[in-house]
Image (spheres, rainbow, N blue to C red):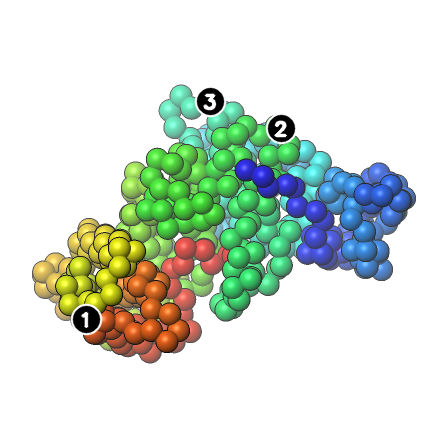
């Protein structure tokens, strides 16, 4: 790869200025531009008035290398932050109920090496982007739990936790609007967002205290087993084990801590509906510790009037996909290949629904849905996710056919696309304002 370390950006500098509002930030060395001109003296205090000066120069070294903040994040601060979340968030405490094991994992996490520039960026996140910092702490704890297997060396557990702690470091260097929930991103913003695993990788890789396994996992934390992830669209065993763990940890933290509605019930449904994207043994391990009935956020799940009927209709639409499109004209080799790929996605979703117990035959054996509030909520989430995945497949079909601005789809394909859109509108008319699962977890 030919990526180079990102130059200091306006976004990181703005985060530094925001941090300086709460605690002293100083230049720990003289700061020069690439022409050798001094921009700031050693010991200079950073404040809002210096923002334009910093932005007017291409600095000779990354900005995070040259600054210090009073009360920097260290291993002890990370441990205390995790202890705080364990005290208030039942899911994370439930992962490790034994006090001896809990203390051992906290000791391991506290030992993670933090070079000066890494510690500074974590401090900036804590002070100026607290949601990003809290996501890092939760991810570190979850990764330590995932990596804690019999006879596993403590160093390996520490490095898995380090991957969780640092995987989103690149977000500090990107536009903070990208982290705001429920906003419609432009194409350029989405491209910038999709770059953050690469930026994070570069920021971690330049510090040689982290092995390549960590660097690779950081870059892979949005790669999915079925090849639908980014930035490289890796598939199956092309993704490292730590990368698979980190991808799942990212989703779990986003769903457990990034949503006020659903909580563990929402996560349970998403995991069962995404077995094709995440490692099945890891999913089963997380499912084993979920307890939706004890999560008060389950009460806030908006329900569909007849989620079982929606699931039946989704299954019917999937079955009506025009395989091979025998009546289609202009069936070029590329379009034929695209239809085959979409057929594979259709089959994948049908298998997923069967594994989730949501086929028409399985639903017929259920008692009255509205008589069991938790079941009603669970089926509503299942229906919502199934329809979202179905619509994602329909968009893939549109792209694969590539009709163009003025082009038309064959009648059979257009009829199927219209059915998908009608079902999507029907579901989201009942769930106005809600957000389905996305390949990019909600904290981004």
Closer to us: 120 or 2: 2
First of labels 2, 1 by sequence position: 2
Q: Which residue is mark 2?
A: 208
Quick one: quadrant of the N terminus? top right
Q: With 345 as the anchor, is 186 left or right in this view?
A: right
Residue 139 appears in the figure: yes
**Marked residue nearer the N-terminal end (2 or 3):** 3
Q: Which residue is nearer to you in this view: 293 or 69?
A: 69
Q: Is residue 355 above or below residue 372?
A: above
Q: Position of residue 393 (x, y in %)?
A: 30, 61
Q: Secondary structure at mark 2?
A: loop
Distance from disc 3 to disc 1, alpha carbons, whole Å, reads: 57 Å
- Residue under pointer 1: 412
Residue positioned 55% across, 49% down in the render: 196
- Circle nearer the viewer, 2 or 1: 1
| In the displayed structure image, the side of residue 107 where residue 235 appears, left or right | left
Residue at screen point 51% across, 53% down: 194
Left or right for 294, reference 416 = right
Compared to residue 193, the image places residue 79 above or below, namely above
69 relative position to 137: left or right: right
Between marks 3 and 1 in the image, the one whose residue lies nearer the viewer:
1
Q: In terms of secondary structure, where does tag 1 sit? A: helix
User: Is disc 3 in contact with disc 1, using a CB cutoff of under 8 Å?
Assistant: no
Which residue is under mark 3?
153
- Residue 43's spot in the image, x, y percent? 88, 43
């Amino acid at each position: 790869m030919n990526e180079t370390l990102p130059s200091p950006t306006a976004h990181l500098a703005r985060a530094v200025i925001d941090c300086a509002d709460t605690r002293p930030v100083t230049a720990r060395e003289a700061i020069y531009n690439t022409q050798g001109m001094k921009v700031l003296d050693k010991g200079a205090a950073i404040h809002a008035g210096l923002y334009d000066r910093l932005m007017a120069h291409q600095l000779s070294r990354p900005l995070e290398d040259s600054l210090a903040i009073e009360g920097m994040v260290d291993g002890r601060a990370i441990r205390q932050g995790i202890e705080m979340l364990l005290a208030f968030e039942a899911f994370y405490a439930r992962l490790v109920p034994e006090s001896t094991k809990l203390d051992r994992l906290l000791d391991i996490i506290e030992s993670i090496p933090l070079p000066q520039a890494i510690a500074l960026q974590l401090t900036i996140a804590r002070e100026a982007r607290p949601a990003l910092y809290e996501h890092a702490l939760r991810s570190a704890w979850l990764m330590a739990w995932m990596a804690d297997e019999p006879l596993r060396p403590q160093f390996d557990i520490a490095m898995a936790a380090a991957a969780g702690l640092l995987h989103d470091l690149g977000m500090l260097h990107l536009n903070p609007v990208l982290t705001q929930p429920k906003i419609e991103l432009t194409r350029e913003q989405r491209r910038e967002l999709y770059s953050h695993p690469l930026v994070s990788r570069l920021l971690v890789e330049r510090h040689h205290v982290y092995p390549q396994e960590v660097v690779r996992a950081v870059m892979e934390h949005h790669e999915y087993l079925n090849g639908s992830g980014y930035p490289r669209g890796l598939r199956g065993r092309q993704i490292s084990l730590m990368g698979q763990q980190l991808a799942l940890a990212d989703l779990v933290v986003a769903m457990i801590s990034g949503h006020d509605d659903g909580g563990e019930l929402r996560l349970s449904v998403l995991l069962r509906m995404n077995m094709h994207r995440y490692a099945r043994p890891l999913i089963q391990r997380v499912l084993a510790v979920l307890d939706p009935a004890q999560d008060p956020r389950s009460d806030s799940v908006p329900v569909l009037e007849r989620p079982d009927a929606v699931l039946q209709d989704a299954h019917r639409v999937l079955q009506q996909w025009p395989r091979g499109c025998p009546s289609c004209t202009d069936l070029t080799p590329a379009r034929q290949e695209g239809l085959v790929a979409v057929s594979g996605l259709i089959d994948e979703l049908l298998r997923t629904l069967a594994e989730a117990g949501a086929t028409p035959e399985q639903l017929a054996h259920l008692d009255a849905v509205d008589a069991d509030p938790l079941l009603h909520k669970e089926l509503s989430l299942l229906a919502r996710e199934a329809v979202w995945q179905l619509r994602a497949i329909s968009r893939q079909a549109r792209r694969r056919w590539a009709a163009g601005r003025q082009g038309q789809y064959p009648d059979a394909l257009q009829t199927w696309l219209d059915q998908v859109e009608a079902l999507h509108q029907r579901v989201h008319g009942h769930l106005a304002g809600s957000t389905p699962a996305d390949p990019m977890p909600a904290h981004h």
